[in-house]
Image (cartoon, helix red, strand yellow):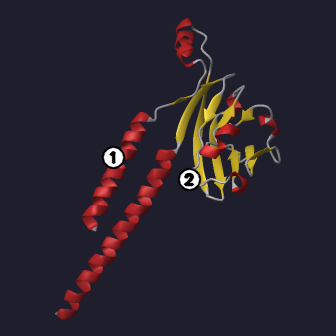
Amino acid sequence: GSGSIQSFPRRVDFTLIFIFCFICVFAVLINKVCLQVTVEAVIGGSVVLPCSSAQHDLKLQDTDVHWRDKNDKIVYSIIKGKHSVAGRDPRYKNRAETFPDEYLRGNFSLKLINLTHADAGKYICFLTPSNEHETAELIIKETGNTPSDQENQGEDSGANSVGKSGPLLWVCILVHVLLLALIELFT
């Protein structure tokens, strides 16, 4: 009799801990997906891929930033606040640049120029020692050949736009709210 009554609360505690851990892991995974940015650009145009540090007391002399492409090739490196060409993939020579005036604000965004189809894919910005990273998916579109396409591109003029992130953003917000509600329910 009394043995089963005492074991019941322990089983409930274990179940609650398991559910809480599952929710936390799920929230982290959803957060990573939600933070990925999709950027669209046209062949021959240019694009800015975003990367910023959340650190408030950023010391450039202690900060390294490495941009890598889908093949893990080095696109651009900033070592201790200075541009470094060491190990850079030759196809990015004279095509990749950053904004040094923005470094102290934590902005390490990358500008790629003279875009080709080969530039399409994932780019990851790694920041050390803070171990932050951001992922951007670059989609390359053809330049328009029909008059209506050219009119539409005139509005963009080859500039980057965050594409199709509206619905995904709302899904991410909804999932976060639901997870917070579940966490409140079980605490």
Q: Position of residue 184 (x, y in %)?
A: 28, 62
**Disc 1 marks which residue?**
174
Q: Position of residue 5 (x, y in %)?
A: 19, 87
Name the residue at the bottom extreme: 2
Q: Earlier in the sequence, mark 1 or mark 2?
A: 2
Foreground disc of the pair 1, 2: 2
Name the residue at the left extreme: 1
**Disc 2 marks which residue?**
56
Q: CA distance from mark 1 to mark 2?
A: 28 Å
Type of amino acid at the residue the image marks with label 1: Leu
Label 1 close to label 2 by CB (< 8 Å) = no
Location of the N terminus (image quadrant):
bottom left
Q: Position of residue 6 (x, y in %)?
A: 23, 88
Type of amino acid at the residue the image marks with label 2: His
Marker count (numbered): 2
Q: Nearer the viewer, residue 57 or 70?
A: 57
Name the image quarter holding residue 22. Answer: bottom left
Q: Is residue 29 above or below residue 50?
A: below
